[in-house]
Each structure stands twice: as structure tokens, then as C-alpha cells.
Amino acid sequence: MAYQGIGTGITPNDGTGDDLLTGAVKINSNFEEIYTSLGDGSSLQITTDKVSEGTNLYFTNERAQDAIGTAIANGTKTGISVTYDDASNKIDFINYNITTTSSNKTLSKFEYCTVTANGLTLTLPSSPSVGDKVMVGVSGDFSSTTIARNGSNIMGLAEDMTIDRGYVTLTLIYINSTLGWRIS
């Protein structure tokens, strides 16, 4: 329905405008349209559900959450990992202990270790808890960096893992005793 204006006449009480009944019907019709468009017909429920998403106009909650998660993750400093779980709307901040090694080493939980020599063995933390993470960065063209499992499975296997590519970074997260450490 289009907006219905009330005829007011030219001067007060000149008989050329709408009578009271016609004016009241137009007012009620206009409000009925507003209450139907912005509510359930009898009460207003002003939300953004019926508004179209567009540039600089309106963001759905989902899009706003995604934008915030991306902005935080992209704006972090070295040694801080930020993950955003879209399904739970959870942002997780982890401050990693940053280390560099040119010799064999046992990693600690939440350590980011950069490998600077070929043929090294990095041993995963003992007694990990669900959610523990380690990061390994291979800073050269090294083809034989070993990740020793230290009693926990890696990718569901009771085997050590070999990183056979140079210039890579891996994040390993501990899932459970069956799956063990997984590349994420």
C-alpha cells in the first residue's frame, strides 16, 4: 500500500479536507503498514533482519564477526597466534614462546621453534593436554627435520614425522590420546 496523506483543506474548517473518519482510516492504514513491515502486524520488532546487506550500509552479525576475527588475526604481532572459530564465534589468543635452534631440542607447550640446521630432531612435549599447540618453522632448504612423538601419536600413527621440505611452518595441535598431534 502506498502512503495515504490526509487532506487538510486550505484553511481550518473550510470543508475541503478529509472528514474525521476518513483521516482516522488513513492514519490507521499507514500505521498498519509500518507495524506489518517492521513487526508482526500488532507490535514493532525493529531488527535488521529485513534490511539488505550492502557496502557501508549494513552487516549481518555473521559478516561482522568474520570481519573482526580476520582483522584481529591479521593485526597480531609475531609470537601471538589468533584463531577464530566461526561455528562457536570464539576468538582464541595464544602467546607462543619463540625459540631458534640449530641442535636437537625438546619443545615446550605453545612454543614456536625455528629450525636453522638440517637433520635436527625436535621432540614434542610429554604429557600433552587437549588443545596444546606447537609451531615449527623450517628456515632453510632442509629436507630432514624429524618431529619425535615422545609417546603420543602424530596424525593417528605411532610414528615420528619427518618434514622433508624447506621453508615451511607447521602448527601441531594435540587432539586426544588416539589421534595425538594433528597438523592444523
Image (cartoon, rainbow, N blue to C red):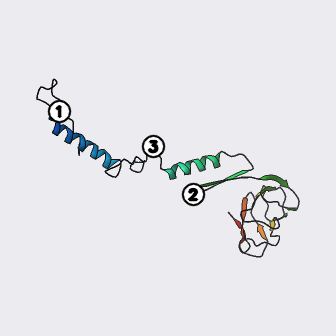
Callout 2 environment at 10 Å: few (<14), some (14 to 19), or many (20+)? few
Whether residue 8 is visible to the viewer of this picture, yes or no, is yes
Structural distance between the alpha carbons of marks 3 and 2: 22 Å
Which label belongs to residue 7? 1
Quadrant of image for the C terminus: bottom right
Give the number of the mark in front: 1 or 2. 1
Q: Residues within 10 Å of mark 1 (few under 14, many from 20)?
A: few
Q: Is residue 53 left or right of residue 151?
A: left
Classify residue 103 as left or right of residue 131.
Answer: right
Q: What residue lies at 16% left-to-right and 39% top-to-bottom?
A: 22
Q: Residue at x 20, y 39 (%)?
A: 24
As drawn, the residue found furthest toward the left would be 15
Residue 76 in the image, given as x and y percentages of width and height: 68, 46
The secondary structure type at the circle numbered 1 is loop
Q: Quadrant of residue 171?
A: bottom right
Marks 3 and 2: which is nearer the front? Answer: 2
In 3D space, how far apart are the residues under numbered discs 1 and 2 (Cα atoms)?
54 Å
Secondary structure state at the residue bearing disc 3: loop
Q: Which mark is residue 86?
A: 2
The answer to whether the residues at label 1 and label 2 have Cβ atoms under 8 Å apart is no
Residue tagged 3 = 55
Residue at image location 48% in from the left, 47% down from the top: 59
Residue 173 found in image quarter? bottom right
Of pointers 3 and 2, the one earlier in the residue sequence: 3
Compared with 82, 104 (above or below) is below
